[in-house]
């Protein structure tokens, strides 16, 4: 091949490109397509769809649109699956405007939406905080084409609501499900509770919990974690702490689906609520409880705790003594908080005195992961 004694045909090129697509090798795919064009080897739908799917995997929207334009140049008509991959690449790259353009192109090419495309595109929308306007447009387009949303599409849309604090839209979608005879499941209610939780709508979250019980659906750990967030943001600290205690009890029984992520989310929301109420003792107690269970402390939890210690920098010593297995992200969160805080000097002194910085630096150096932002080193030097 390389010596020019063998000229591969379209079948071989397509096989090689499909293999490169699985590895996400966009530059290699681009070079192969250009070689095919120079050698007048036909490019077909399968080849371009594989290339664009690879772009979706690494959120390279520019390459996806480039391959889509090349398809038109080669008079290859995109399929619904091709458009699906291109949309996902754009959504993951946080380029909603390009995704909307693709919807218009689909309409011009007379390529209709299907439920698989709608669901996967909605799922991609849930990966960005700006995903709701695009999700709303996708739902509008699907309905205009006469598609009837199924449970998976509704749950994907609700997931977008839960991640973008669109609790009102979540309730509308839930009502729409009921009107169209689509029965909700645990995932549905978990998303509704999470949306209400991020919006601080405790009564609505409790209402969703009651609906689950009425339908005989056992709340999982994610539902209880969402409820803690709702109660905490509503200023109902005692209720939030009671739900955390209940969730811990469920985890101990091991007869309900409660994972480490659920415990971390619930404790983080509760710590944030304690911070808002100035209850630093409860905040530190919650972190100690997580540490005792072997649940890793992440950056969100540290940020929530540091906010609660804003008026009491000497209490940072207790916090730093609790965090014995910090991640690189957690370490950087501490440094960033110290840098931006009016009491950064006392915070930093406590981190030094407790050996937190020494512990973190030693661990990251051993793992080859020492990558602290320059701005954070500036704070440390001060």
Image: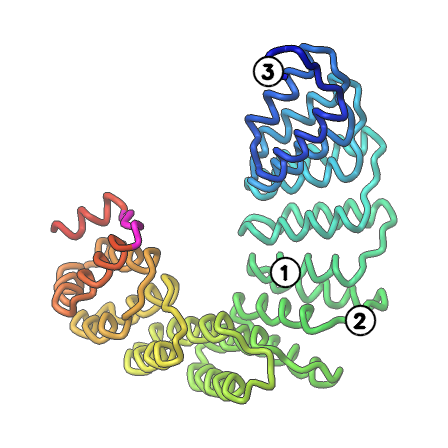
Sequence-first tag of 1 and 3: 3
* Residue at image coords 61%, 27%: 29
Quarter of the image with the N terminus in it: top right
What residue did someone put label 3 on? 2
**Magenta residues, start to end:** 367-372
- Residues packed near mark 2 inside 10 Å, few (<14), some (14 to 19) or many (20 plus): few
On screen, residue 31 above or below 381: above
Residue sitting nearer the eye, 207 or 51: 51
Relative to the observer, which residue lies in front, 361 or 352?
361
Which mark identifies residue 183? Answer: 2
User: 245 above or below 8?
Assistant: below
Is residue 352 in the magenta section? no
SS at badge 1: helix
Would residue 232 be found to the left or right of residue 155 on screen? left
Q: Secondary structure at mark 2?
A: loop
Instruction: Write the residue at 64% across / 28% down.
Output: 65
Cα–Cα span, label 1 and label 3: 49 Å
Mainly helix, strand or loop, the magenta region?
loop
Tag 1–tag 3 contact (CB < 8 Å): no
Name the residue located 19 percent from the left edge and 59 percent from the top edge. Answer: 342
Snapshot quadrant of residue 11? top right
């Amino acid at each position: 091949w390389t010596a020019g004694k063998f000229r591969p045909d379209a079948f071989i090129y397509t096989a090689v490109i499909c293999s490169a697509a699985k590895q996400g090798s966009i530059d290699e795919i681009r070079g192969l397509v250009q070689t095919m064009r120079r050698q007048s080897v036909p490019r077909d739908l399968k080849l371009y769809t594989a290339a664009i799917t690879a772009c979706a995997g690494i959120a390279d929207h520019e390459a996806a649109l480039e391959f889509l334009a090349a398809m038109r140049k080669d008079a290859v008509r995109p399929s619904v699956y091709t458009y699906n991959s291109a949309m996902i690449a754009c959504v993951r790259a946080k380029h909603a405007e390009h995704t909307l353009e693709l919807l218009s192109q689909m309409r011009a090419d007379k390529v209709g939406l299907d439920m698989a495309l709608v669901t996967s595109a909605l799922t991609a929308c849930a990966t960005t905080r700006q995903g709701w306007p695009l999700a709303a447009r996708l739902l509008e387009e699907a309905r205009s084409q006469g598609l009837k949303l199924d449970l998976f599409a509704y749950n994907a849309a609700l997931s977008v609501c839960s991640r973008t604090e669109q609790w009102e839209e979540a309730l509308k979608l839930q009502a729409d499900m009921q009107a169209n005879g689509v029965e909700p499941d645990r995932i549905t209610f978990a998303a509704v509770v999470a949306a209400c939780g991020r919006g601080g709508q405790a009564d609505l979250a409790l209402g969703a919990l009651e609906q689950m019980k009425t339908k005989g659906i056992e709340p999982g750990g994610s539902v209880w974690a969402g409820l803690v967030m709702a109660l905490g943001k509503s200023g109902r600290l005692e209720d939030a702490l009671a739900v955390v205690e209940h969730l811990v009890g469920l985890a101990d029984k091991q007869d309900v689906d409660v994972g480490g992520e659920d415990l971390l989310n619930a404790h983080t929301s509760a710590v944030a609520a304690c911070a808002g109420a100035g209850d630093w003792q409860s905040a530190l107690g919650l972190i100690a409880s997580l540490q005792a269970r072997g649940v890793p402390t992440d950056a969100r939890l540290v940020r929530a705790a540091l906010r609660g210690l804003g008026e009491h920098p000497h209490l940072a010593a207790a916090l730093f003594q609790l965090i014995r297995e910090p991640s690189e992200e957690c370490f950087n969160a501490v440094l960033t908080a110290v840098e931006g805080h009016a009491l950064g000097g006392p915070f930093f002194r406590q981190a030094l005195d407790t050996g937190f910085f020494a512990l973190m630096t030693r661990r990251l150096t051993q793992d080859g992961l020492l990558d602290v932002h320059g701005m954070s080193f500036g704070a440390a030097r001060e």
